[in-house]
Image (cartoon, grey):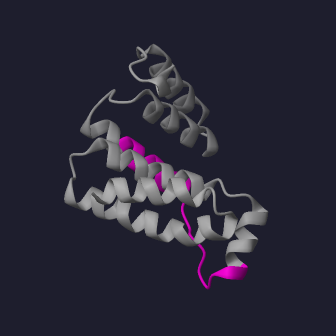
């Protein structure tokens, strides 16, 4: 229930503008963390928490300044934290989702770890498409 609640809050906040998306991001993170705690073997929940960290780490300078002006402490996250969650998801269910491997590659790239980024991108490309997201 926590995983799906976080997914729905995240999806609907996109229609409400930057301020609402930032505000609701705290709720989204809390519910993804709860989903991971309640179902530690659910690779999807771990992947989604990684996506949250990746998106926060990828925020533009302008969006960060807006968040800092609106909230005492804006959401924070790093590519390293995102990578940890994506790798944990991969450890739980190796090869469960092409996008997870792609996100691992993107994290390595953001961290300037080019060889690891290439390796994970290769692993993602070698997987067969199983879902519309994979194509």
Q: Position of residue 41 (x, y in %)?
A: 21, 46
Residue 31, quarter of the rendered image: bottom left
Is 6 or 100 nearer to us in this picture? Answer: 6
From this view, report whether residue 123 is shown above or below residue 50. Answer: above
From this view, report whether residue 39 is shown above or below residue 93. Answer: below
Q: Relative to 108, is 96 on the left or the right?
A: left
Is 39 or 3 nearer to us in this picture? Answer: 3
Q: Position of residue 51 (x, y in %)?
A: 49, 49
Q: Relative to 98, is 60 on the left or the right?
A: right
Q: Give the residue drawn at x 29%, y 30%.
A: 94
Q: Residue furthest bottom?
A: 72
Task: Please say whether residue 63 is visible from this viewpoint.
Answer: yes
Q: Give the residue drawn at x 53%, y 34%.
A: 105
Q: Give the residue drawn at x 33%, y 43%.
A: 44
Q: Give the residue drawn at x 31%, y 60%.
A: 2
Position of the N terminus by quadrant: bottom left
Q: Position of residue 111 (x, y in %)?
A: 60, 46
Q: Relative to 48, is 116 on the left or the right?
A: right
Magenta highlight on residue 95: no
From this view, report whether residue 127 is shown above or below residue 68. Answer: above
Q: Position of residue 8 (x, y in %)?
A: 44, 55
Magenta highlight on residue 85: yes
Task: Please say whether residue 53 is visible from this viewpoint.
Answer: no
- The magenta segment is 69-87
């Amino acid at each position: 229930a926590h995983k799906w609640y976080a997914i729905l809050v995240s999806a609907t906040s996109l229609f409400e503008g930057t301020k609402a998306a930032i505000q609701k991001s705290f709720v989204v993170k809390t519910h993804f963390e709860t989903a991971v705690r309640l179902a530690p073997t659910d690779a999807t929940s771990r992947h989604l928490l990684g996506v949250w960290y990746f998106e926060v780490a990828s925020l533009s300078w302008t969006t960060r300044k807006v968040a800092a002006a609106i909230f005492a402490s804006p959401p924070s996250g790093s590519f390293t934290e995102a990578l940890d969650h994506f790798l944990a998801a991969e450890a739980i269910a190796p090869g469960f989702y092409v996008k997870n491997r792609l996100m691992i590659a993107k994290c390595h790239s953001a961290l300037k770890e080019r060889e690891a980024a290439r390796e994970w991108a290769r692993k993602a490309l070698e997987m067969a498409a199983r879902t519309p997201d994979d194509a």
